Image (spheres, rainbow, N blue to C red):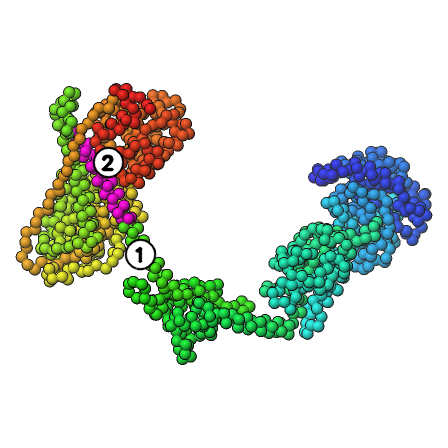
Amino acid sequence: MISDGDKQGTSTTTTTTTTTATKTATATTTPLYPNPSESPRRRTSILTTRNAIQNIRPALSEPVPSPDNVAASNSVDPVPSPIDNNPADWTLDLPDTDHVRFFRSRDWPSTALGPLDGWSFALRLHTFSLFADTRPACLYWYDLMTCAQVDKCLTNLCVQGPFENRHLQRAMDPASWQNSSYIDGKYTPAGVPIGWALEQAEKTKVAADLVEIPLTSERSGYKEETYFTGSFIPLRGDDSKVYGFYNTAYEVTRQKLNDRRATMLNRLEIPSGVHEGTLASYVIPQLETNPLDIPMAMLFQIDESNVSESVVRLQGQIGVPEDHPLVIDQADLSSCIGLYPVFCKAKKEIVTLPVDERFAGIEWRGHRDRLTGFCQPSSYFSVLPIATADRLYGFLVLGANARRPIDDDHHSFMLNIAAKISTIAASVASAEETRRRAERLERELVEREKQIRYMAQYAPVGMQHLSSDGSIIWANEMYYQHTGHPKDAESQYNFSFLDVFIEEDRGRAMQCWADLLQGASHVEIALRIKRMYFPPNGEPEHACLLFLAFPYMVDGEIKSLMGCTTDISQLKWAEAAEARNAADAREAKRQQEEFIDVVSHEMRNPLSAIFQCADMISNSYRDLVHMSAIEILKSNIEAANTITMCANHQKHIVDDVLTLSKLKYMMLTISPRPVRPISIFDQVVKMFQADLASHDITINTIVQPSIGDNKIDSVMFDSSRVTQILINLLTNAIKFTKGESRRKITITYGAALTEPRDTFPKDLYWVPCEKKVEDLTLRPEWGNGEHVFLTCSVTDTGAGMRAEEIPRLFARFEQANSKTSIKYGGSGLGLFISQQLTEKQGGRIGLSSVLGQGSTFGFYVKARRNTAKLADSTALSRRSMGRTEGNGTASGSMHVLLVEDNLVNQKILDKQLTRAGCIVHVANHGLEALEILRQSSCWHEPIKEPKRLDIILMDWEMPVMDGLTCSREIRKLQQAGKIVKHIEIIATTANAREEQIELALHNGIDVVMAKPFIVSDLLSTMKERLGVVNSGIVYQ
């Protein structure tokens, strides 16, 4: 019995069992030899399998056993055994496989062996061994030598002979075994090696080995050349005589092919010494020794007499008649005839292609078909480049082995041939041939150089040829005119060409020289020279030349450098003038637009609140009907305070703009006077007392001991500019602290006689100084007192900022966040101006901040001790406030969505719209507005208690999502059907330039109301957009 795993393995080929069995059973009646007299012994099948059937018994020298001996060998074993207890069913103990079932189905009674129950014990025992063996194996018995093979044999071994539909035929021709083979390391005699092996095994009573038997196997639909090695073990019958043989075999095709191919490759010897033969004389004869692997060959070689290396000549062939179309004496690689198109593809790698009609008429060598008498043609051919790393010698066309697949072994064989022949080709190219070719090319090069030099001498561009050591080999007249380089020999020393450049560009020229020597393919650069250029207007300037230089290489080695020059002085001057004009115009336009945008936005935002508050105050008498006088008074006071705050904000902006203008046109002056520093800080704190109290902000002033230690009393400095810096920093601190739960500001000031930065926190980021500033304290009006530094820091508990936001905070018109602050953002000028003022007074400004904890602004200015009597400093001026009035109106019961991030504007407009009878829903940014829309009656999905929305008032500049983005999203939702009706969007923004209005309309806004505006105008526009008639709303 066999294991379950063996059962599974043997059942994989059930499909082919029946067919094979049928064909085999039929084949057993066909005589092995056409003439029975040719067979010395009688033949009868004993075992058949679905894998292979083989009935072979060549002539043996010993006498034929008599029928009595045969009957005796099939007699019952005298020793009782389990096999004999049930002789009729002994085959039931064999493995349950298709192969065994086929074995049982054989008509054994009609054979010389007789029925299965009459088989001898020895034959049964060897049969059990056969079917239990997992290797490819055969059992030969008596003179019949009938073969039974196990399942695995089908894929590994096919008997050489006629094939039909991949099934073996019983008819076997002994001539198919007439090949010599190795047996025990020696060649067998010519004849039938299997028969010879059986004879030896029967005589010697030991196994006879057959080595590398050539067999033709049919795999994947075509015949393959294969080789097998096996042995024949003599088997004894019940009377201890040899009655049969046990044969096992394994495939050695790959080893055989590798040995054969290696033998041929070893014959391809590399010639040494003086070579008189051609490449073909060394290669073609050796290729002819292996007809199986080289059924045809054509050797093409590059014509060495042609400089371009593009002409190829046929040097030799195998199997190709002289009059064949592929035999072309010579042709250019670009030719489309014969195999030349394939050569272009095979310059760098081996190309393998199917054989086509171009190969018709080839006299193929190798595997000869016994039926037709002709050699089997190749299915593929390969084109091998014969080349070394830097040179192409030619191509070798080889037909592939007709009975081997195109696999890794084939590709490896082709690579080995290409490598071996390429080495031979390189050796054959003798030194003399190389020298002659070099001399010929040199002569041609000299002639061409003469022609080129003649042309270059009169070219309108400068040309020069430099050696690798920096000396001028040759230069044309235009080069000397462009550069002004002297022509005399004394002035043409190594690197003398660098003398023509100005000092600033000489290093760049030398760097280009180094780049070329290090492998750069070319260098193109514009350099200024000492020669002056006189433009149409303006001052003379250094002439500018455009240099294009490249290395001259021979066999990969840089021999010299070449270059050409073009005078681009006029072009550079014109480009620079145009670029300056364009840059000035762009910068002027950009600054103008930036200035207008910032001022307009920051002025209109508070101005809108002023208009609305004033309008509310002026129309408050109308509220006496439903409000008490006290409530109206409180409301008016709150509105007046808002107006004051907005007016102060506008005044800050105006002051900053004026200061900026003075800084730009250098009209800002620093006027020192004797001042006590402590009085400055006290006055600034008193200025902000009301603002600090209204926001419940605690402020502390800390005087450092350095004031007393350094005896700082009266100091010469510009107190107004220092006050302006303090006001900007305190305004900034209040702005970002008033919205926090913990509201505290700390002012710390002191003095230093040496490096003032040591008195500040180590993590303070100091804003880089862009340009060198004059030390104003050296002027006579500052006196001659000792230099001191006044230091100050303002620390708040505001929101803080990230580290990457700090550097851009001090840029003009910049904020850490580009959006308007929740409680008024500011113009972005304050800190920029503070930086300019500190640097103008010999100081610096810096900042440290932690997100969520607060910020510290620190600065210092340079001053002198006052040596004169202290004079009273002037008081700080108060800031004025403006007022704008307007009238309100009623608007019916419109449902309005107000989208505004500025809490002041939001609160005022909400109140006024509510007083006008509107129902107002408030959103702080665009994302909240979209969420409210999803909860409204405009949304396509039914919502419980939806909000009614008639119109949207949309601000532009908002955090999270700005107004334009929100408007675009609303229109997209409306177009997608998620918003079921058109909702009017009115933009209420301080961005009021014509381009900005057009941008808003393009992004889905219906109307733009520019700030500042009064509510009555807004309500009129709302009515106009909604079509309000009397007290009802009609949608147009």
Q: Main secondary structure of the magenta part?
A: helix
Classify the position of the C terminus by image quarter: top left
The crowding category of the residue bearing disc 2, from other C-alpha atoms within 10 Å (few below 14, some 14 to 19, many at least 20), is many
The residue pinned by badge 1 equals 580
Residue at the image position 27 percent from the left and 38 percent from the top:
992
761 or 784: nearer the viewer: 784
Residue at the image position 76 percent from the left and 59 percent from the top:
323
Q: Are marks 1 and 2 in contact (CB under 8 Å)?
A: no
SS label for mark 1: helix
Q: Residue 420's spot in the image, x, y percent? A: 67, 63
The label shown at residue 572 is none
- Three-letter residue code for mark 1: Arg
The residue pinned by badge 2 equals 1011
Q: Which image quarter: residue 294?
A: bottom right
Q: Is residue 244 visible?
A: no
Please report the bounds of the magenta region as a residue range. Answer: 589-616
Q: Residue 160's spot in the image, x, y percent? A: 81, 49
- The CA span between labels 1 and 2 is 37 Å
Q: Please indicate whether residue 850 sits to the left or right of residue 217 in the image.
A: left
992 or 130: nearer the viewer: 992
Q: Residue 910's spot in the image, x, y percent? A: 24, 29
Residue at the image position 20 percent from the left and 41 percent from the top:
734
Does residue 605 belong to the magenta stretch? yes
- Three-letter residue code for mark 2: Lys
Classify the position of the N terminus by image quarter: top right
